[in-house]
Amino acid sequence: MNIPLDKKSYCSLFLISCLAVILASCVSVPEPTVSSTRKASPSSSGVVSPTATFVPVAWGDLPGWQEDDLTAAWPAWQRSCQGLARRNPSGINWKPACAATSQVNANDAQSIRRYFERHMKVMEIRHSSGASAGGVHGLVTGYYEPYLNGSRQKGGVYQTPIHRYPDAWRKKKPSNLPARAELIASGQLNGQEILWVDDAVAAAFMQIQGSGRVRMTDGKVIRLGFAGTNYQPFKSFAQWLLDKREITRATATMQGIQAWAKNNPRRVQEMLNANPRYVFFRELPASPDVSVGPIGSLGVSLTAERSIAVDTKALPLGAPVFLATTYPLSEKPLRRLVMAQDTGSAIIGAVRADYYWGTGDQAGESAGRMKQQGRMWILLPH
């Protein structure tokens, strides 16, 4: 999806206000000093990055590499190859490795493992600047695709509009667009409604996620994809609630915010208006297969638990990345191959990932609670 606007597909922006606390819990053990960012050509180093250092390691150094069921990651890698064939901003030569996928048994994890080990090298990702320079640990958050209930007509419980990006704005980008509350009150969006939903807070979280599925009153399901914003800065609901001492840092999660809204219905609009940014959507066909996720920044469908959002100033879009972290609110290891197929305004830094959990409430539960420490390794073609 080549939208010339800031792609919004991140779950944890409402937790930005808490990042200082989160990052404090993610301080890495001091690492030996490494050389500055690798400056080799794309063919030899894979990427010239101003914020990441890539250190060659052996495949045996990857924790959990032999145990990962790579058959689950293979469709995501094939989608990466499709996207990279159309759009490859990093300039890395992925063609030989992608061409070789046709010789791989997609149902054989060992065959897939041999493929990656034969055609790629593995490199540990380290921070190359700031207080974490040389460090290997970073923050891993989560995001998901929510389900909402909607109607083509306003009425009854369906009072919250979902708007399309006005065509007139595409022809000429307006200057000084008002913040969310003023924009809606101005009437500029009248007639731009795609549909109405029954939950204003759920609609606000869909704006944070950047996509969603909507169950319509006629039983059909449609998908909404990101189409643009009013160019205003994002302000965290969590920060607003923390500033007013309505929640604690321990409850500054999506679930905590939803609980507060349920207990304070008369103040929900006040909370929503605290965020000046407003997100627009476009209607897309919805596959009945929920494993086919929304379109990420690479232009391909995301794969539940096998796609991540990254900072493209540090990592090349489309690349395979081995992620070692833990499940939300636990020490249970989560170690697997994922694909860097998306981006997000909150995803900044070398060892930083937003993990796509999938579609629906269960995925949302995991995404909303995920604030884990993690390590990352990038796989690059020889």
Image: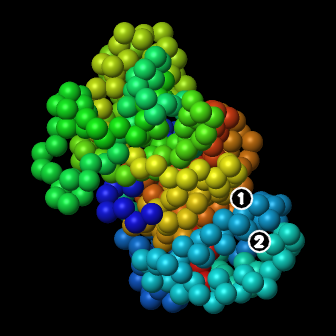
Is the residue 259 above or below the residue 98 in the image? above
Looking at the figure, which quarter contains the C terminus?
A: bottom right
What distance separates the C-alpha of mark 1 from that of mark 2?
Answer: 14 Å
Residue 341 visible to an observer of this rendering: yes
Is the residue 109 above or below the residue 114 in the image? above
Name the N-terminal-most of marks 1 and 2: 2
Residue at image mark 1: 336
In screen coordinates, is 221 left or right of 103? Answer: left
> Which sits in the foreground, 322 or 307?
307
Q: Quick one: label 2, few (<14), some, or many (20+) residues within 10 Å?
A: few
Residue at figure coordinates x 46%, y 16% from the top left: 156
Rendering quarter of residue 276: top left
Rendering quarter of residue 154: top left
Across and down, in percent, residue 335 comes to: 72, 55
In screen coordinates, is 329 left or right of 133? Answer: right
Circle on res. 47? none
> Which sits in the foreground, 302 or 111?
302
Q: Secondary structure under badge 1?
A: strand
Q: Nearer the viewer, mark 1 or mark 2?
A: 1
Across and down, in percent, residue 76 comes to: 66, 65
Circle on res. 60? 2
Is the residue 64 above or below the residue 187 in the image? below
Residue at figure coordinates x 40%, y 46% from the top left: 281
Q: Amino acid at mark 1?
A: Arg
Across and down, in percent, residue 178 comes to: 17, 37
Judging from the image, the colouring scheme is rainbow
Residue 252 visible to an observer of this rendering: no
Q: Amino acid at mark 2?
A: Gly
Residue at figure coordinates x 56%, y 34% from the top left: 216
